[in-house]
C-alpha cells in the first residue's frame, strides 16, 4: 500500500449484543467484553489495524450506553472521534455519517469499515488482504468488500457472488450479494466455488461512499450532511439528536451495495478481495463454543469448553460453561450453554443459542431493565 494513501478505519460498535446475554448488557455489550483472550473485542479490532493506521485516524460509531466504556478502553483514539448515535439506525447512516465527516477533511481518504466484534486469526494475511483492498479503493470510484472463502454451507451469513478478475490484481468483480440463504442454496453456493461469505468489512474513498449515499439514500443524505457540517460546533449535539432519528433505518449492504440501475449496472465498481485468513463473527454462544473448540481452549475429552472456577462432568459432553466464581458439575447433559453471572443464569441448548436475544426482549417487555 502506498504511504501516500490516507487510510481511516471506521469501527462500527453500536450493537447491543443481546445474543450474548447475560454477560452482554446495554453498557457492557459484546464488543467491550473479553470473550476471546484478555483484551476486549473492540480493543483487538483496533490493535490489528495499527500497522496501517494510527489511533489518531481511527473513528468509532457507537451509542450513548457504550461510548464512555469504549473511550476508556481505546485511550489513544481522540474522544471527539467516538461518535455517539442518539438512536440506532443500522449501518448505512453510520457509514454515511463517517463518509460525510471525513469527506470534509479529505475526500480522497480511504475509509475502512470494520465490525467491532469479529475474531480474525493470521493477522499478517489479514493485513496483506487489507492493503490490496485499500490500494484498489484509492485507485478510483471503487467499492471493496473482503470476502471469506466459505468452509461450510452457513445459513447465517450473507454471500457474495463473484465473476471474472476484470484485470484487477487479487480482486474479483462482484455480481451480486445474497443475504442468509436457506440450506439448499448455501450448499449450491459453496459447491460453485465463486461465492464468498460477506465479512462486513468494506473499503472505499470518502467521496465514493458519500456519493453512493447521495445516490441511493436521497432523503437521508442531506440530513447526514447537515449533521457533518455541524460537527465541532456547539450545535452538533442538538443537530445530531434532531436529524439522525429521521434517517432511514437500513443496512449499508441493502442501501449502497445491492442497488443497481435499470441496466443492471452499479454506479461504482464493486470488487471482492478474497481473504485467506480465519474469520469468525462470534454471533452467538454456539459460535463462541465452536471457535474455542477449534482454537484456544479446545475443550476436554468430551467436548466441553469451560471458563469456570473448576468443573466436573459425568457422562456430559459438548457443553459450554462460563462461571468464573462458581464450581460447576454437569451430569448426563449434552449440548448446553451455561452462563452464570452475578445476577442472572442462562441455560440454553446450543442449537437455540440464536434465540437468546428473545430473552432480552421479554425482559424489556416485563420491565426487568436492571437485567438489561
Image (spheres, grey):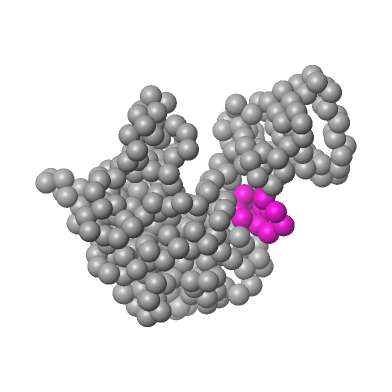
**Residue 56 pos. (x, y %):** 52, 77
In this picture, residue 39 sits left or right of residue 53: right
Q: Is residue 13 above or below residue 350?
A: below
Q: Can residue 45 be spotted in the picture?
A: yes
23 vs 181, nearest the viewer = 181
Residue 122 appears at what percent x and percent y? 56, 56
Q: Looking at the image, which residue is at 44% across and 78% down?
A: 233
Residue at x-position 34% and y-position 78%: 106
Q: Is residue 132 left or right of residue 37?
A: left
Q: Nearer the viewer, residue 118 or 79?
A: 118
Q: Position of residue 306 (x, y in %)?
A: 77, 39
Q: Residue at x 71, y 34 (%)?
A: 320
Prevailing secondary structure of the magenta residues: loop
Where are the magenta residues, as a range?
Answer: 26-41
Q: For residue 353, what is the image quadrant?
A: top right
Query: Depth check: 177 or 167 in front?
Result: 167
Task: Pick the quarter of the image with the N terminus.
Answer: bottom left
Amino acid at each position: 500500500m502506498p504511504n501516500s494513501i490516507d487510510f481511516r478505519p471506521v469501527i462500527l460498535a453500536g450493537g447491543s449484543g443481546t445474543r450474548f446475554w447475560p454477560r452482554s448488557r446495554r453498557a457492557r455489550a459484546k464488543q467491550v467484553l473479553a470473550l476471546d483472550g484478555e483484551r476486549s473485542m473492540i480493543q483487538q479490532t483496533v490493535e490489528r489495524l495499527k500497522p496501517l493506521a494510527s489511533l489518531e485516524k481511527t473513528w468509532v460509531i457507537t451509542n450513548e450506553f457504550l461510548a464512555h466504556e469504549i473511550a476508556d478502553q481505546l485511550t489513544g483514539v481522540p474522544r471527539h472521534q467516538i461518535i455517539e448515535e442518539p438512536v440506532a439506525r443500522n449501518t448505512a447512516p453510520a457509514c454515511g455519517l463517517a463518509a460525510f465527516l471525513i469527506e470534509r477533511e479529505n475526500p480522497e481518504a480511504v475509509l475502512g469499515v470494520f465490525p467491532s466484534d469479529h475474531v480474525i486469526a493470521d493477522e499478517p494475511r489479514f493485513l496483506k488482504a487489507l492493503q490490496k483492498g485499500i490500494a484498489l479503493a484509492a485507485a478510483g470510484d471503487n467499492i471493496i468488500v473482503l470476502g471469506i472463502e466459505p468452509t461450510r454451507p452457513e445459513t447465517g451469513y450473507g454471500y457474495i457472488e463473484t465473476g471474472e478478475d476484470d484485470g484487477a490484481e487479487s480482486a474479483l468483480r462482484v455480481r451480486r450479494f445474497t443475504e442468509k440463504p436457506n440450506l439448499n442454496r448455501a450448499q449450491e453456493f459453496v459447491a460453485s466455488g465463486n461465492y464468498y461469505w460477506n465479512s462486513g468489512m468494506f473499503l472505499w474513498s470518502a467521496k465514493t461512499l458519500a456519493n453512493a449515499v447521495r445516490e441511493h439514500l436521497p432523503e437521508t443524505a442531506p440530513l447526514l450532511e447537515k449533521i457533518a457540517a455541524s460537527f465541532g460546533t456547539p450545535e452538533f449535539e442538538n443537530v445530531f439528536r434532531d436529524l439522525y432519528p429521521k434517517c432511514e433505518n437500513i443496512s449499508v449492504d441493502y442501501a449502497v451495495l445491492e442497488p443497481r440501475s435499470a441496466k443492471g449496472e452499479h454506479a461504482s465498481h464493486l470488487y471482492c478481495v478474497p481473504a485467506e485468513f480465519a474469520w469468525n463473527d462470534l454471533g452467538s454462544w454456539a459460535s463462541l463454543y465452536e471457535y474455542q473448540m477449534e482454537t484456544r481452549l479446545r475443550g476436554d475429552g468430551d467436548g466441553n469448553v469451560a471458563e469456570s472456577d473448576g468443573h466436573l462432568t459425568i457422562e456430559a459432553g459438548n457443553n459450554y460453561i462460563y462461571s468464573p466464581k462458581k464450581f460447576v458439575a454437569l451430569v448426563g447433559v449434552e449440548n448446553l450453554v451455561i452462563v452464570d453471572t452475578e445476577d442472572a443464569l442462562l441455560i440454553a441448548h446450543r442449537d437455540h443459542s440464536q434465540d437468546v436475544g428473545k430473552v432480552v426482549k421479554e425482559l424489556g417487555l416485563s420491565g426487568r431493565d436492571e437485567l438489561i
